[in-house]
Image: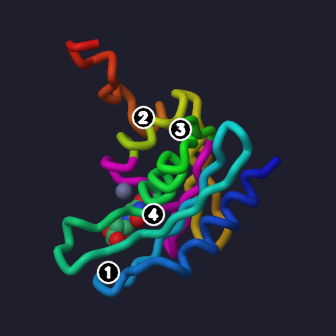
């Protein structure tokens, strides 16, 4: 079983692979799937700034593209004074693959940790059931 502490450690480690020549702000993420596997990711920037992929979405897309569609928790880490908080785009993507009580562990490289659920981070998320073709 991977603990929250281990997930935070892996998120911090993942920062070393961040591609951040523009912001110099390295972010790492590490998630756990329902079968206990761990996937990590870092942010990947682009000269066309808006094409940047956040660390959280990198980790999610790695897991889902390997067939692991149900996630249980994700840790995110950066060099911030307070635990780093996922952007709105990542919250929506996380809500697709985490159950409503799925854990998001906000953290920083100094070891501060704040655990929240995805429902707390994104109340009223847009869902598949909101589509009128279901
Ligand atoms: O939770 C966050 C917040 C920001 N970023 C990235 C996007 C960009 O590369 C840099 C600055 O916004 O940090 C993430 O990866 N995750
Ligand atoms: Zn994001």
Residue 51 seen in this snapshot: yes
Ligand 1 occupies quarter: bottom left
Q: Tell me the CA gap for discs 3 and 2.
A: 9 Å
Q: In the rendered image, which residue does mark 3 sit on?
A: 69
- CA separation, marks 3 and 1? 31 Å
Secondary structure under tag 3 reads: loop
Q: Residues within 10 Å of mark 1 (few under 14, many from 20)?
A: few
Q: Which mark is residue 55?
A: 4
Mark number displayed over residue 74: none
Magenta residues, start to end:
73-90
Question: In terms of secondary structure, where does tag 2 sit?
Answer: helix
Foreground mark, 4 or 3? 3
- Decide: few, some or many residues near mark 3? Use Cα within 10 Å; few <14, some 14-19, many ≥20: some
Q: Earlier in the sequence, mark 1 or mark 4?
A: 1
Looking at the image, which residue is at 53% across and 67% down? Answer: 28
Instruction: Answer whether residue 81 is visible to the viewer in this image.
Output: no
Q: Provide residue 49's location: percent of width, then percent of height.
A: 20, 72
Q: Position of residue 5 (x, y in %)?
A: 75, 58
- Name, please, the residue furthest toward the front: 66
**Of callouts 4 and 3, the N-terminal one:** 4
Query: Vertically, is 56 above or below 33?
Result: below
The percent position of residue 129, horizontal first and vertical second, equals: 33, 16
3 vs 2, front mark = 3
Coordinates of residue 113 in the picture (x, y in percent)? 64, 57
Query: Is 82 one of the magenta-colored residues?
Result: yes
**For the residue with label 1, is its CB less than 8 Å from the closest atom of ligand 1?**
yes
Q: Which residue is mark 1?
A: 23
Distance (Cα) linking label 4 and label 3? 17 Å
């Amino acid at each position: 079983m991977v603990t929250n502490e281990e997930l935070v450690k892996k998120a911090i480690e993942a920062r070393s692979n961040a591609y951040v020549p523009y912001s110099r702000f390295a972010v790492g993420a590490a998630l756990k799937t329902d079968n206990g596997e761990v996937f990590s990711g870092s942010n990947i920037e682009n000269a066309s700034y808006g094409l940047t992929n956040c660390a959280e979405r990198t980790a999610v897309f790695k897991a889902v593209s390997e067939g692991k569609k149900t996630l249980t928790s994700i840790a995110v880490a950066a060099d911030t004074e307070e635990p780093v908080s996922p952007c709105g785009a990542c919250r929506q993507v996380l809500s697709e693959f985490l159950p409503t009580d799925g854990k998001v562990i906000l953290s920083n490289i100094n070891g501060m940790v704040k655990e929240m659920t995805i429902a707390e981070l994104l109340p009223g998320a847009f869902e598949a059931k909101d589509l009128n073709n279901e």
